[in-house]
């Protein structure tokens, strides 16, 4: 491309922090139109006639006729490397340097394989670079293994749509991306995963602009209403009464690995991965100040990595948890030695049947069953009807409108007459979903009750240290919920300020 003239435009979005960089790249070689501003492409794309003249009113892509869409495709093709637009985070001086880099990239023109590379090839190129040299944009530190794994996991979801990943990147339009989202929804992809796919595609397309495969990001054509939104997690902490009741039931049972992990979550507010990643050298139960040393976590894939915040923090242990862990250590040591399995410093605190790391996914499946048995959750079918498990002999009349699953006295699934299901007598297939308590909500419950406690209150900085957060913002914004008892107890503040009235 020939040398460009003009300095470009830097628009300040947030004072001293965020800028919009726009660079005009001259005339379209096919139509001779001079593009004065990169922001004109998406709005004017459907508002031109066959001679390149503007026609008003402007149209949205979804409202255009087939002829207008075809004209848009012909008009857009020669303009792939004509204009550039980019949002930039940094100082004004850094934004000026970046717009000069954009100018140099535009003058060099597209890279040699720009008209051949497919989406799947570019995606693999982008993620491979991230795995090798990726840096967290907020902390400026190398990406953690968990973040690299998350990129590949999200990529596999997108790769399920074959027609999209085999498209050339230069041919991908905003309409193609919307069609991709619709197909992923039809495949049963949830809102959270769909949002992650959208963010990954956005990063890949921005990378495509940066490495001169395309000159314009097609995601910029999408309206805000078309973009998958990040679903807000509906975390509900347990009430104090329910929390104490569940805790008391756990303490009545003999110590075991799974219930011990739940008890640890309720007594410390640790994350699931941090609990399952504990090893006995990190558990200090001797002395007057017992504590847990949190250095690592067990990921969903079963790998041991550094903690979420890449730091080590100490969590004190109450006497209730201390006594339970001491009893569990004796039970675990006896079990492992009886089965000729190793018990040493490498042994996890909460082990599976063969003395190794407990699979987080299997723990999650057990936790859902445990929550249902405690009345903290329930199963339902696709129509929302609750699924109730009863033992043969129990009365089912009070569960009108529910689906009954029967079990015999030994806990085996059976029909209502007591005949067990087997390979030759299979039980009906029933699609179900779980609604109720999740392991992470125990963390919300712990810190909500801990901060709201009047007898033994703690300050925000101490709560931040216990939770292992780098700043208190996450604690106050997400984890600390209001407690109804304290809300009503706040009444009477004005009464105490006023002098008492004499009779």
Image (cartoon, rainbow, N blue to C red):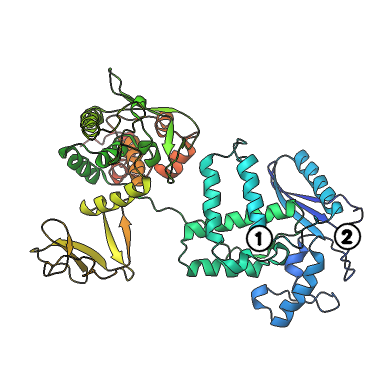
Q: In which quarter of the image is the C terminus?
A: top left
Mark 1 lies on residue: 119
Pick whichever, 94 or 453, lies toward us.
94
**From where the camera sits, is residue 349 visible?**
yes
Marking on residue 26: 2
Q: Nearer the viewer, residue 2 or 234?
A: 2
Q: Residue furthest left?
A: 393
Quarter that holds the N terminus: bottom right
Q: Is residue 491 left or right of residue 63?
A: left
Image: 125 above or below 357? below
Q: Which residue is drawn at 85% across and 52% down?
A: 108
Give the side of residue 343 with respect to residue 180, left or right: left
Q: In this view, does 460 lie above or below 217?
A: above
| Nearest the eye: 379 or 258 | 258
Disc 1 packing (10 Å; few <14; some 14–19; many ≥20): many
Residue at x 67% of width, y 55% of height: 122
């Amino acid at each position: 491309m020939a040398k460009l003239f003009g300095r470009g435009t830097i628009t300040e979005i947030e004072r001293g922090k965020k800028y919009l960089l726009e660079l005009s790249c001259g005339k379209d070689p096919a139509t001779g139109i001079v593009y004065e501003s990169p922001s004109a492409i998406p709005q004017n794309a459907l508002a031109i006639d066959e001679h390149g003249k503007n026609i008003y009113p402007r149209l949205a892509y979804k409202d255009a006729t087939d002829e207008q869409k075809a004209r848009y495709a012909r008009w857009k093709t020669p303009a792939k490397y004509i204009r550039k637009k980019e949002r930039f985070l940094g100082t004004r001086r850094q934004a000026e340097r970046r717009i000069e880099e954009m100018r140099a990239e535009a003058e060099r023109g597209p890279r040699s394989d720009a008209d051949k590379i497919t989406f799947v090839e570019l995606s693999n190129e982008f993620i491979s670079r991230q795995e090798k040299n990726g840096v967290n944009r907020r902390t400026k530190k190398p990406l953690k293994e968990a973040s690299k794994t998350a990129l590949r996991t999200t990529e596999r979801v997108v790769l399920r749509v074959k027609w999209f990943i085999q498209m050339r990147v230069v041919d991908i339009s905003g309409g193609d991306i919307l069609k991709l989202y619709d197909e992923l929804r039809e495949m049963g992809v949830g809102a959270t995963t769909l949002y992650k796919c959208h963010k990954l595609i956005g990063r890949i397309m921005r990378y495509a602009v940066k490495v001169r495969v395309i000159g314009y990001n097609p995601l910029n054509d999408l309206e805000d209403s078309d973009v998958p939104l990040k679903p807000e997690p509906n975390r509900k902490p347990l009430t104090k009464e329910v929390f104490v009741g569940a805790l008391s039931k756990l303490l009545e049972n003999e110590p075991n690995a799974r219930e011990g992990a739940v008890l640890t979550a309720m007594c410390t507010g640790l994350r699931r991965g941090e609990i399952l990643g504990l090893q006995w050298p990190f558990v200090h139960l001797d002395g007057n100040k017992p504590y847990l040393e949190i250095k690592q976590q067990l990921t969903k894939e079963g790998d041991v990595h550094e903690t979420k915040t890449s730091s080590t923090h100490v969590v004190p242990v109450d006497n209730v948890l201390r006594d339970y862990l001491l009893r569990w250590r004796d039970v675990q040591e006896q079990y492992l030695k009886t089965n000729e399995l190793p018990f040493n410093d490498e042994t996890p605190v909460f082990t599976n049947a063969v003395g190794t790391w407990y699979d987080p996914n299997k723990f999650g499946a057990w936790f859902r069953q445990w929550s249902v048995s405690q009345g903290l959750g329930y199963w339902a079918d696709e129509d929302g009807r609750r699924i109730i498990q009863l033992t043969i002999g129990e009365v089912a009349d009070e569960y009108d409108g529910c689906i009954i699953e029967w079990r015999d006295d030994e806990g085996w699934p059976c029909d209502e007459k007591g005949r067990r299901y087997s390979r030759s007598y299979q039980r009906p297939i029933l699609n179900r979903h779980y609604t109720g308590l999740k392991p992470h909500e125990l963390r919300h419950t712990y810190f909500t009750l801990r901060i709201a406690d009047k007898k033994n209150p703690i300050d925000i900085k101490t709560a931040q240290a216990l939770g292992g957060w780098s700043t208190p913002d996450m604690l106050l914004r997400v984890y600390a919920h209001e407690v109804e008892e304290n809300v009503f107890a706040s009444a009477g503040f004005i009464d105490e300020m006023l002098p008492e009235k004499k009779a």
